[in-house]
Amino acid sequence: MRTYSTEQSPTTEQPLATATEEPTDLRVRRHGLAALLSVATVAHVLRPQWFLAMIPSWVPGGRDRLHALATLAEATAAVLLWFPRTARAGGVLAAATFVGVFPANVEAVRRGGYRGAPGWLSTRAAAIARLPLQVPLVWWAVRVARGR
């Protein structure tokens, strides 16, 4: 279990936090990442064709199996992130998943967009714009995993 600082507040005699209380900013980051992964999981379940089309044919394991694995990883990370005791594992799993699915985002650019996605999301420009977003997602997950 993580412990947090119990320094005295400079203006009062009350501690800033108890030994088991999670700082609000960390809780907000953790819950935000859990919510994002929860929405992604629902999208994977409701619109699998969007994600199946992104998986490069050269990646071993078969598209259906890899899609199922990515969906399971996102769902598991989301569940782990909702709770402080398992947030470290959730952050590590989220970061690994974000790195692991990056080739699919590159493949979407190569193929000209996210096939089957609605409107602008199906364009190559959307796929290109999506690529650099993977970096802050990995950073966010690592930061949560480190308890920061």
Image (cartoon, rainbow, N blue to C red):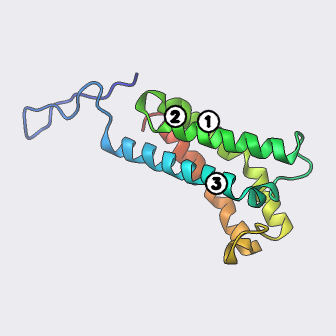
Q: Amino acid at mark 1?
A: Leu
Mark 3 in CB contact with mark 2 (< 8 angstroms): no
Residue drawn where x is 58% and y is 51% of the image: 137
Q: Residue furthest bottom?
A: 119
Residue drawn where x is 75% and y is 61% of the image: 50
Q: Residues within 10 Å of mark 3 (few under 14, many from 20)?
A: some
Mark seen at residue 23: none
Q: Is 28 placed left or right of 71 in the picture?
A: left
Q: Position of residue 81 (x, y in %)?
A: 49, 38
Mark seen at residue 134: 3
Q: Residues within 10 Å of mark 1 (few under 14, many from 20)?
A: many
Q: Nearer the viewer, residue 60 or 68?
A: 68
Mark 2 in CB contact with mark 1 (< 8 angstroms): yes
Q: Amino acid at mark 3?
A: Gln
Considering only order in the chain, which callout, 2 or 3, is on the residue closer to the N terminus? Answer: 2
Q: Residue furthest front?
A: 46
Mark seen at residue 80: 2
Residue drawn where x is 78% and y is 54% of the image: 104
Q: SS of the residue at dot 1?
A: helix
Viewer-side label of 2, 1: 2
Q: Residue furthest top?
A: 1
Q: CA distance from mark 2 to mark 1?
A: 9 Å
